[in-house]
């Protein structure tokens, strides 16, 4: 791989231990994937923030880097941590876990990373522009950045994203190369989709069929951010792609792929059935905000909860900044009065929840995946209305 003089100096240790170590990581990655050069990045989002996933080895790695002078050179934000950084007690997080999680965050802060712990950085100030090369980690955010914002990023691991922050670079391969971003499968969505879980079901149905190939969707034009982020999360989880196109907006007829997939109402209904454990009638945990809730979603939850009381643990996962907006407008008070809780900085997948609940109700196909896989929950998927109803009655009644 060609390196500039500055990059050679970084690799040689002239910019210190932390830069050298992280340049070594990127050079090794570049060699593995056949990159010809490094490219500067303008934004970084680092996953691998929850102590639940990092453990002591990960914590030690971060603290060592911070102590040895590692500094982020550009705007760098974090993925959700294992707890609400302020309100962890109310969410039932153990003291010992909280102390370790706080050390993780302190290490990142020492490195100059902004501790806005969210998988929707594009909603709260880390929003790249079309054509920007960036290094993001969280799979739904990566897919959103590539597909909706038109930025260019591979799906980085936590260490390689942090290395990009510390060196300001990433190896030029994969999604950074225009040639690799062409659509490979034309996906005709023949059913009119409106609810967020239907977009999750679309990602499930298509992801299962085409794996990591790049689809070009027809029939979802004009979908709002809430639906698109759900699709991004689901298709990345169940298929592995980091990019999709929406045919009507981005493709010329010449670029229509030969391989075609048609998605019908039966496919969407089948996906929703697959994500629903039909035998689970009682629900003991309701979690919305995978990916993190927008203000529009919080408004809807607040309206549905007004004058009601929830009987079950109900988390609204969102970025702290979004929650603060919701406080200013008055949505947060309605939600809290009803007994539901904000889970800022964290989510239902990266918080230590194993053993605490049995049945998760959510509007997110991705949350079903992690609820089942990581926490052994049974899952129920439905609209925000259906989830709020389950929180109030304790039952899934759809
Ligand atoms: Fe975000 Fe957690 Fe879902 S990181 S995409 S809320 S699994």
Image (tube, rainbow, N blue to C red):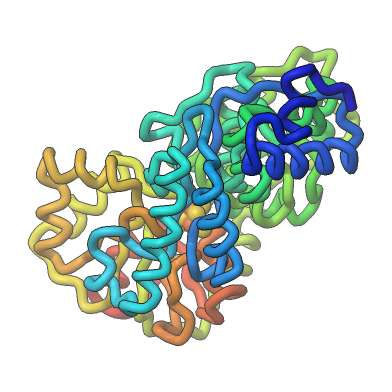
Percent position (x, y) of residue 248?
65, 20
Q: In this view, does 301 lie to the left or right of 6?
A: left
Q: In this view, does 149 lie above or below 361?
A: above
The residue lying toward the viewer, choosing from 344 and 18, is: 18
Q: Which residue is drawn at 72% across and 35% down?
A: 13
| Lateral position of residue 118 relative to residue 331, left or right | right
- Taking the spot 55% from the left edge, 41% from the top edge, the residue there is 70
Asked if 97 appears above or below 319 in the picture, the reply is: below
Query: In this view of the protein, can residue 322 be seen by the observer?
Result: yes
The residue shown at (43%, 64%) is 82
Is residue 273 shown to the viewer in this render? no
Task: Specify the quadrant of the image occupied by residue 34.
Answer: top right
| Quarter in which the N terminus is drawn | top right
Q: Where is residue 391 in the image (x, y as percent from the top left)?
A: 28, 71
Viewer-side residue, 99 vs 225:
99
Front residue of 325 and 17: 17
């Amino acid at each position: 791989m060609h390196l500039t003089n500055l990059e050679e100096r970084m690799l040689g240790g002239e910019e210190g231990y932390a830069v050298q170590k992280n340049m070594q990581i990127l050079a090794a990655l570049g060699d593995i994937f056949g990159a010809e050069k490094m490219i500067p990045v303008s934004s970084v989002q680092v996953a691998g923030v929850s102590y639940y996933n990092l453990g002591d080895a990960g914590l030690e790695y971060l603290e060592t880097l911070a102590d040895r002078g590692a500094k982020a050179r550009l705007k760098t934000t974090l993925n959700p941590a294992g707890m609400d950084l302020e309100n962890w007690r109310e969410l039932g997080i153990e003291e010992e876990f909280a102390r370790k999680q706080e050390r993780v965050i302190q290490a990142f802060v020492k490195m100059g990373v902004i501790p806005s712990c969210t998988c929707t950085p594009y909603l709260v100030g880390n929003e790249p522009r079309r054509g920007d090369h960036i290094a993001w980690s969280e799979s739904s955010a990566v897919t959103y950045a590539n597909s909706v914002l038109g930025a260019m990023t591979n799906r980085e691991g936590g260490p390689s994203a942090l290395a990009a922050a510390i060196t300001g670079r990433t190896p030029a391969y994969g999604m950074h190369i225009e040639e690799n971003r062409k659509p490979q499968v034309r996906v005709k969505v023949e059913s009119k989709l409106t609810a967020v879980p239907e977009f999750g079901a679309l990602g499930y149905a298509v992801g299962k069929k085409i794996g990591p190939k790049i689809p070009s969707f027809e029939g979802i034009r004009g979908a709002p951010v809430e639906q698109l982020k759900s699709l991004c999360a689901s298709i990345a989880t169940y298929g592995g792609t980091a990019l999709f196109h929406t045919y009507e907006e981005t493709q010329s007829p010449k670029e229509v792929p030969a391989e075609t997939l048609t998605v019908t109402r039966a496919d969407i209904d089948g996906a929703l059935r697959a994500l629903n454990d039909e035998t689970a009638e009682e629900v003991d945990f309701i979690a919305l905000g995978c990916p993190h809730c927008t203000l529009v979603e919080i408004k809807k939850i607040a309206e549905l909860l007004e004058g009601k009381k929830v009987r079950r643990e109900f988390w609204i996962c969102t970025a702290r900044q979004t929650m603060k907006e919701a406080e200013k407008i008055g949505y947060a008070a309605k939600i809290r009065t009803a007994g539901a809780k904000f889970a800022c900085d964290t989510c239902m997948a990266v918080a230590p929840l194993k053993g605490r609940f049995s049945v998760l109700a959510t509007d997110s196909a991705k949350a079903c995946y992690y609820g089942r896989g990581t926490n052994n929950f049974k899952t129920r998927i439905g609209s925000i209305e259906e989830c709020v109803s389950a929180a109030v009655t304790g039952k899934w009644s759809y």
